[in-house]
Amino acid sequence: MEDAPVIAIVEDDRTLGRELARLLSLAGFSAKLCPDFSCAADWIVGLDAACAVVDLKLPGADGHAVIRDVRARSLVPIIMLTSSDSEFDEVMAMNLGADDYVCKPYRPAALIAHIQALLRRSAPPAASTRIERKGVVLDLAAASVSFGGKSADLTHNELKILGLLMRNPGVVLSRSEIMCELWESDVFIDDNTLTVNVNRLRKTLRSLGVPDDFLVTRRGQGYAV
């Protein structure tokens, strides 16, 4: 389909990959299957995809390494697929830059819903919008944050979290409110996933020299800036 959003699929189960590609096509996407797992990161970046779906266990490759290599060069939204229910694998994937995490076995329709929701969350603002608080400047259109002459790109989830907090300065927002902003629901979302995203945002801010008390945690209540 011409001009359809491209979804990159890195899945070693060819039957499952082809079925997912077929359903994505019916949903209005242009699905591409990775032909060579050993260079999956290069393939995803070169494809200029709207979203990448990456399996954790790949023959001759590691899904975590693929995510790390893609994130070093691109802000493309990434969904990690895995048959593992290990919390370590989820935390590792999110820390490396994955935006979502889906366990196998999954219903293809549910995965497509995750993709559609992630693309909605990742859509850039209609116009450049800048928010400033305590010297921290958030550029929503550029998906970047700056402080003291230094700047850094933000992942989609970092942008959503920081944008929500900075639009409500001094207001303690509950974890549930923030999860609804990120995933449009707090149902079936692992609470630890939000913690991973907030910690990653703190690390980004710290790299710019932003004081640790800029983003505060109110135990039992939520977060505020």
Image (cartoon, rainbow, N blue to C red):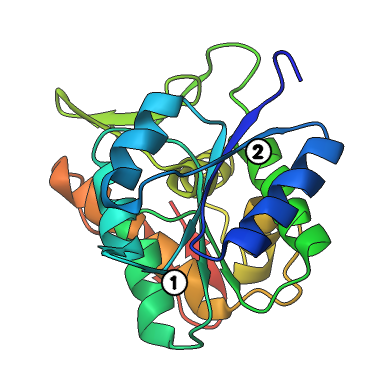
Residue 55, visible in the rendered structure: yes
Q: Secondary structure at mark 2?
A: helix
Where is residue 152, by image quadrant? Answer: top left
Mark in front: 2 vs 1: 2
Residue type at the position of mark 1: Thr
In the drawing, does residue 93 fall left or right of residue 20?
left
Give the spatial CA distance, label 2 vs label 1. Answer: 22 Å
Within 10 angstroms of label 2, few (less than 14), some, or many (20 or more) residues? some
Q: Amino acid at mark 2?
A: Leu
Residue 152 falls left or right of residue 34: left
**Labelled disc at residue 119:** 2
Q: Which mark is residue 214?
A: none
Q: Does residue 112 appear left or right of residue 127 in this picture?
A: right
129 versus 212 height, above or below: above
The residue shown at (74%, 55%) is: 19
Tell me, yes or no, whether the two marked residues, 2 and 1, touch with CB atoms within 8 Å: no
Where's residue 143, x and y in %? 43, 28
Q: Nearer the viewer, residue 144 or 173?
A: 144
Residue at horizontal 36 percent and vertical 53 percent from the top: 97
Q: Nearer the viewer, residue 102 or 223?
A: 102
The answer to which of marks 2 and 1 sits earlier in the sequence is 2
Q: Residues within 10 Å of mark 1 (few under 14, many from 20)?
A: few
- Residue at 72%, 22% (x, y): give it: 4
Q: How far from the left and from the top, in percent, is residue 165? A: 52, 47
From what the image shows, is residue 110 above or below residue 9? below
As drawn, 109 above or below 73: below
Residue 136 showing in the rendered view: no
Which numbered marker is on residue 195? 1
> How many marks do you count on the picture?
2
Q: Position of residue 27 (x, y in %)?
A: 84, 39
